[in-house]
Amino acid sequence: MELPTYVLPGDALGPASQFSAGAGAYVDGGTVRASLAGTPRVGGGGAVLSVCRGDAGPSAVVPEVGQLVLARVLRISPLCAHCEVLLCEGKPTSAFSGVLLREHATPGGAADAPPMEDCARPGDVLQAVVASLGDARSFFLSTAPLHCGVVAAKAEVSGLPLRALSAREMEDASGAREKRKVARVEAAAGEA
């Protein structure tokens, strides 16, 4: 079995019927999945799948203004979400931080901005655009374009994966709904 070179939290690594989960991995619904961003590895005589966090290697890229990134939300406040940038234009990055300001989370800016917890929550994976280089610590991100927003999330109460219902709502397998600024990935082609 050939493993991808880099995985994000929730990515499938292999069937749980053939492999057990090691460090940085977990079993969910018969599949071993990554619990963190990093490089997947096979160990234990070929029976254990794990994920090693660390530098993405020499091919890692530095995000630039206007580029599309994937970022995992680490924590939120009423005014912003603090994120870890995982991929830039589909390529691994080194350890970069991103900040999504509330007024850049949805179209319309500050006047129409919903509460941050209705846009993203800790653990969510966002597709975002680099809005500006920010300061020495973080890039400023935007999820205002239609093709940007939450692309992967788990329900706060059940822990089940969420699926998109609309541009502002997601649902888990039990029918519980949560608000998010949902990415419309198919919109990327229409906006270009």
Image (spheres, rainbow, N blue to C red):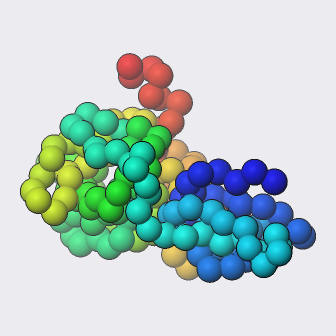
Residue 184 location (% of width, % of height): 49, 38
Q: Is residue 2 above or below residue 51?
A: above
Q: Nearer the viewer, residue 168 or 91?
A: 91
Task: Give the residue drawn at x 25%, y 49%.
Answer: 141
For residue 160, say whether it is visible. no
Quadrant for residue 23, please give it: bottom right
Residue 96 location (% of width, % of height): 29, 59
Quadrant for residue 47, please give it: bottom right
- Quarter of the image with the C terminus in it: top left
- Quarter of the image with the N terminus in it: bottom right
Task: Give the residue drawn at x 24%, y 39%.
Answer: 64
Position of 16 with respect to 32 (left or right) is right
Task: Give the residue drawn at x 71%, y 61%.
Answer: 13
Q: Is residue 116 above or below residue 75?
A: above
Quadrant for residue 16, please give it: bottom right
Q: For the image shown, how many numbered marks are present on the structure?
A: 0
For residue 49, say whether it is visible. yes
Q: Nearer the viewer, residue 107 or 148?
A: 148
